[in-house]
Each structure stands twice: as C-alpha cells, then as structure tokens.
Image: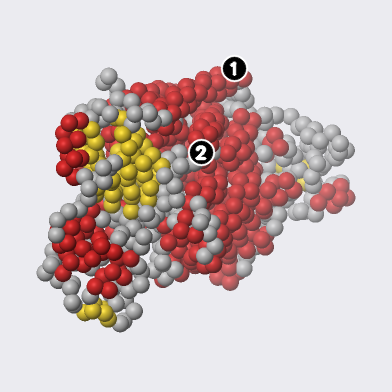
Amino acid sequence: MGRLFDFMLPENKSPLTADSTDGLFNFINEASLVIFLGVVLAMIYFAIRYKRKSEDDKTPVITHNNTLEITWSVIPLLLTFIVFGWGYSGWLNLKTVPDDAYEIHVTGFKWNWSVSYDNGAQTINEIHVPKGQPIKLVMQSRDVLHSFFVPEYRVKHDVLPNRYTYVWFQAEETGESQVFCTEYCGTSHSNMLAKVIVHEPEEFQAWLDENGGGPSGSPVEQGEQLVSLQGCQTCHSVDGSELIGPSFKGIWGRDRNLADGSSVTVDENYIRESILYPGEKIAEGYQNVMTPYEGRISDEEITNIIEYLKTID
Amino acid sequence: MASASPTANNAATTPTKLKVKRFPPAQTPTNTYLTDEKGVWAWLTTVDHKKIGLMYLGAVAFFFALAGFLAIALRTELWTPAKTFIEADTYNQLFTLHGAMMVFFVLVPSIPAALGNFILPMQLGAKDVAFPRLNLASFYIYVFGAIFTFLSLANNGFDTGWTFYTPYSSDSNSAGIIWVTLGVFILGFSSILTGTNFITTIHKLRAPGISWDRLPLNVWALYATSIIQVLATPVLAITILLLAMENILDIGIFDPALGGDPVLYQHFFWFYSHPAVYIMIVPGFGIISEVITTFSKKTIFGYWAIALSSLAIAFIGFLVWGHHMFTSGQSAVATTIFSFLTFLVGIPTGIKIFNWVATLYRGSISMKTPMLYVFIFIFLFSIGGFTGIMLGALSVDIHLHDTYYVVAHFHYVMMGGTLIALLAGLHYWWPKMTGKMYNEPLAKIAAGFIFVGFNVTFLPQFIMGAQGMPRRYYNYIDQFTPFHQTSTIGSYILAVGFLIILYYLAHSLFKGKQAGPNPWNSRGLEWQSTSPPDFHNFSHTPVVIHGPYDYHQPMEEFQLGLAVEHGHGEEHAAADATSSEAVETATSETTEA
C-alpha cells in the first residue's frame, strides 16, 4: 500500500472494502490529479506563452479539431466505465450478506441507537460484536430518518421508520470504532453517536451470556437499567443539568409549569402520560421533540421507571 | 461552427436583401437606460429588461450577503466542538437558512435572472425580452416568495435542512416549515416565467443575421437552462403541494405514520433538485465561453461541442437524480442505473473544460479580472467535477455520502463554479451595465483573497469528510478540530475578498472612470452599443454577418444595422433604404426581421 491519497481515509478495519472502496478512492484521485494537472498547467502555460503583446494581436482561426475532440471525449468515457464497474462490484459486496452472518437488531430513534441481540440482551449506543465473523445489522427507525455510518468499516445505510434496512461487515481485529448518524434528525443529531466494540469470539459469548434476558433486580434497579437502555439520559439528566428535556432530579411530587400556562403535579399518571404521549403536556421552556413510547414499552416497565424516578433527589 | 461568410440558414424562405450601414457606438452616450426613466417609482414599474436585471442583481447580492453572513456565523460556531457561541437549535436553523437562501434566492436566479436578463436581449440585438411585463412579474413573484421565507422565521423558523426531508419535515410542529415551502413554491413560478420568456426571446427576437450557428454560447447556455427551468420546476411545486397536503390535511403521502413513504419524497425532491444544479451551473458555462474568447481575442474552440454539451447536460441531468439516494433504500437496479448515467453527465462537462483550454492555445491572452476569474473557475470547478466522479462511484459514495466530502464537493461546484462564473460575468459586463470601470489592481487582489480563502475553507473539508465527519453536525469529535479551525480561518479570508469587491464596485459607481462602449475590444454584439446602453439597447436594428467570436474579422463589420431609423421592421427598411445614407452595404439572408 502506501498510496498518495491514503492520508485522507481513516484506518480500514474491514478488509472486504480495502480494494473496492479504498483502492477505487485512490484510483479516482490519482487519475483526477493527472488530468487536473494537465488542464491547469496547460492553462497557465498558454497564459504565459501567449500573453497579449498589443491590442492589435492577430490570432489564428482554429474552430475545432475532430481528432482532439474525440480523444478527449472517449478517454474520459473509458475511465468512467472503469470507475463505474469497480464501484458497482464493490457495492455488490456491500449488499450481499454471507449466509452465516450473525444478526443484531439496531433501532435508531432521536437520538440514540438501541441494540438487541438474539438472546434478549440489550445495549444502548454500544454494538458488541465478535471478531472474525460476518455481522449483519438489521436496522429500523422509531421516528424520523437516521443513517448508520461506521467510517472504519466504509459502510453506511439510511435507517427508515417504515422498513428494515441492513449493513454488514466483518471485523478482523478487536477494538472500538466510531458510529455516526449521518441523516439529519434534529437538535441532537450530532450527538447521536455509538461505538462498535469488537471482542474475541469467546469473550463476546461471555459478555452475551452475562447480559442476556434484559433488566433484573428490584423494581428501582430495573427502572434504572430501563432509563439507561431506552436512552432517556440523552435528553433527561439525573444530576439536574439542563439538556433537551427537563432533568429527572427531584421532579417527583413537584408542581410543573406547562407551555400552555397551566401546571400539573408530577405523579404516576403524569409520568405515564409523558412517556406514552409526550406531546400531550409540554413542560414550559421545552420543545415537543420526544418520540412517543406508545406500544414500545410495557406497563410493568413504566411502573419500574416511575419507582426509579421517585428515588432521584 | 461560426462561419465567416453569410450562410443561408433556411432554404424555404426567400432571401431578402437588406440595406445596412455602420453604427459605431458613441464614446459617451447622451441618453441611456439609466437616464431615460428616473425615480424609485420608474424603477419599480419598469419593464426594461436591463433595469429588471439590475433589480435582480441587487436582490441576489442582498441574499448572498445575508446567507454569507450566516455561513460565517456557522463556521465560527464550528471553531470548537459543542457550543462556541450559539445553541444547537439555532445552529440547525442557520444552516438550513444558509442552504435554502443560497439555493433558491441566490444560485438559481443569479446568472439567468440577473446577468442573463441584462445581457441576453443585447446579445440577440433585441430591444427587450419577448414578454417584458411577465419579466417584471417574475421579479415580484421572487420578492413575494422571499417575504414568505422571512415570515417563516417569524413563525418559529425551520430546521430541516434545505432538502425538507420527510418525515422530519412533516413531523415538525413548527409552522415555519409551511411558510418556507410556500415561499419556495411561489419562487418556482418566477423561475418558470423567466425560462419561458428566454426561450421565446431566443426563438423569436434574434436580430437579422443571428442564425443558430451565430448564437453566442452564453445564449446557448441560457437556452439549455431555460428548458430545465420550465420542465423541472413544476415537479418541485407538485412535491411541495403534496407535502402541504400531508401537513395540513393529514393525507399519507410521505409520512410512514400516515401510510406514506419517505423515500418517495426524496425521489420527487431530487427530480427537481438535481436538474436545478444544472440550472445553477450551466449559465456559468455561458459566461466562461464569452469571457475566454474576448480575453484571448480568438475564435472559440469547438463551438458546437460547447453549445451541444450544454443541451446534453440539460437532458441527461434529468436522469441522474437517484445518485443522491444511494444509501436511501431505493431499489438496487435503480441505484445501478443512476450511477451509470451519472458518469455520462460528467463527460460533456469535461469536454467543455478541454475546449476552453484549447481556445487559449495561440490566443492573445490578457489577464484582466474577468479572465482571472475564468482561470479560477477552471481550477475550482475541475476539482468539483472530479470529486463528483468520486461520489458517483457506488462503493465510494457509500462511505462519503452525507459527509463533509459532499459539502466540499458541492461548494466547489456551486461556489467555485457558479459564483466564480458570476463574478467573472459581473466584472466583464460591469462597464456595460454601469458605464464605469472599476479599480483593476484591487479587483485582482480581491480575486486572490477569494481564491486562497475558498481553498483554505473547503480543501480541509474533503479530508475530514473522507475521514468520516458527517455534515449538518453542531458538535463533533475532537479529532476533526484542526480541519474545522482551518476551514473557519479560510471563510474569514473569503469574506475579506467579498468586502473588497463591495468597496471597489461601490467606488466605481460613483467615481469610476468612463468605460467607453467596448473596453475589452470584444466582438460580442452587446459591446456594439453605448455603455450604459440606450433604453432600447441599440439606436438601430443590428444586422449580424459574423459569428460572435470571429476575431479575425474587422470590428467595423460587427457594427452594422438596418439603414433606417430604429426598429420599424423590414417593410419600412425596404421603403426607406434608398434615402438612407449607406456608408457600407452588406447582403444578409435572414429569416427574421
């Protein structure tokens, strides 16, 4: 390796794309550089060589030259055919998931990535994967469009609310890679980040076994885990700091002023309503941006969250 | 190609002998379009294409200054990750406003409606466009659309990005989105009317002797642009209507919550907005062809290649919209076809660049400010073009889509292309429009600031985009800080360049030297009138016997007109021909009077 334009790309952790993405990226840049320098140097050379000497300069009448016209049409055309074919075959690789791929479900919602595994384990904004195995991420959105992008794997796909989309990759070394949301989705679009964490296969299995089965423990403990897994803390702090939504700190039993001028006491029913139908009562000074949880969370889970919220002073 | 001898361009009509005489333009005009009607009311109600062009130019400059100011605010905010001085929601509104204003209020009308309006009838030797009142109406529709956009700011604003993607835009509970899309809807009519007007003008109002092979390339470019404007803009209107129906009546079209499909919206939106990219750039190509021939004193190389490639771009440009959607979930077959067609549209663009450079060969090259901008254009726009090829390649686009690489790419095309071409045209035709010269050394210094500032701003964006920095990000991870800071510094240098331009152009208006009719010794017809031109552009009906780039023909032969008093048409010409004092007679066969 060691190509001229390698410095532009991040480290490539997906050997699948080393040639089809990075190789093509370098090829287009190098071919472009040659043509670009040709054009610019010719232009500058002509400007110097044929600098105007007097206003009465006579210039030759050169209207066209068919050989030249055909040459500079056909050569770029052939080059673009190469680029098209190369890009197309690389893209087919990205579209064609191996049969033995390990499936992980990813749900994007404002402004988190929720991840669930085949044994019921759940994570938020962390995607744990085993090394050396094809991974297929089956993705959907709960609200608006998002887009799942891992620069180091050269994969990206939009995440839609009305259908499943997927990406696949195979990591060959352990470590972490950054995930970005690349489809604009509102206030915290730029904070909708996650990490892909690659483990040794046995390490991954151990992690999976340990985290299977969802939240556990007392209602308060389960509530705390749910608040974390549902990504609530992206917008609601537990230490009183101001984020996109009201902080959870000390809200229980307090009177809250609403945007329409009325006020309400924070009790079980208010919290339940605010989780399921957040647009019904907007707290004063905040925007109506929360995704409704109607149909996405059970009554028992809501109860556990309420129990947890009572404990945050 | 531009042939030197008169040619019969329509065998079906009987050739008419025209008596012509030479009308050398006066050095200092006594009566111009600027002195003919005076006062604010006369300006606001004028149907003169030149005044309307200037009003457009003023409006475009105003929106450019505003959107440019927003860009500086955005770049300043990006000096540090997280908050530098404005909140995330404000940032999101500002980048949306910057994009929407630059696209709809600056780039789309900039060259056709401002410079085109002024120059097109003059290049055709016409008194005005075909429908002068419609022309004025299109300006007011533009103003009206702009007012709606400002009303949206008073209604919570909008933060969807200029693309208004659903379901984000239909879920948005801000009333601002309704107002701004209504504004864009209204604006579309302005664009359609200008396009219709230009097509009719080009077909019907060419002066005697301007056959299709003597049409200036600027006119060819505006012709291609007008076709796109007329055919593509209605689709934007339909899309916005559907969006409004969904928002107001809750009919499910694009929003999955109502049973719609968000990808359908993207198809509709880009069906307009990709051709719109050519509405923005193709008129720029026209300016480059005019300037490069004048300042090389030489026939254009490959007249037909350049003229027809504009039309090719216009037509193929309709078939590539899906390349904005490679990661969207559109069908695999569509993605493949769109990628392939995207490369085809790159070829005619490349052909133009090669022809322009070939025109320089053995020319008599004068590096005046307009020519300097042409060189800057070829440099920057080539980079924009090559990076477009990069983005058309499927596997690479998957990585680069919606990153700063794309941001850099379209700024190289739209700003490095369209706006630099606009600057070339503005400096080229400024003496014609105002009758004044500007400060040449200062103009070159400003061009230097713009060239350096532009590259310092946008080159780092290619790198950080390829590194993975997504677009429309308020916050970013630390590793991108040096790129963002370099880019911000570049934007300040760029701003200084534009401030210098503002200064010397204002100075030129009040204290500039008299330009004279043809300061660049161009063979273009628009230069054979006084500067500033007469109210009716010429004091005579011009007669054209050479191509617009025939620099081997004497200047006198470009100054011919019907040997009668101004504008009475052919019958009158025949009747009066004997009494007129013909200093020079040429025979021309024409189809139009």
Compared across the picture, whether A88 is left or right of B210 comes to left
Compared across the picture, whether B518 is left or right of B393 comes to right
Residue at (52, 67) in percent of width and height? B248
> Residue B240: x percent and y percent?
54, 58
Chain on which label 2 sits: B
Real-space CA distance between mark 2 and mark 1, rounded to the nearest whole angstrom? 40 Å
- State which quadrant residue B465 falls in: top left
User: Which residue type does callout 2 highlight?
Assistant: Ser
Can residue B82 be seen from the camera position used here? Answer: no
**Number of disc labels:** 2
Mark 2: which secondary structure?
loop
Q: Which residue is mark 2?
A: B331
Q: Which residue is mark 1?
A: A67
> Residue A180: x percent and y percent?
29, 44
- Label 2 neighbour load within 10 Å: few <14, some 14-19, many 20+: few
Identity of the residue furthest to the left in this view: A313
Residue at (76, 32) in percent of width and height? B6
Residue at (61, 23) in percent of width and height? A64
- State which quadrant residue B32 falls in: bottom right
Q: Nearer the viewer, mark 2 or mark 1?
A: 2
Screen quadrant of the N terminus of chain A:
top left
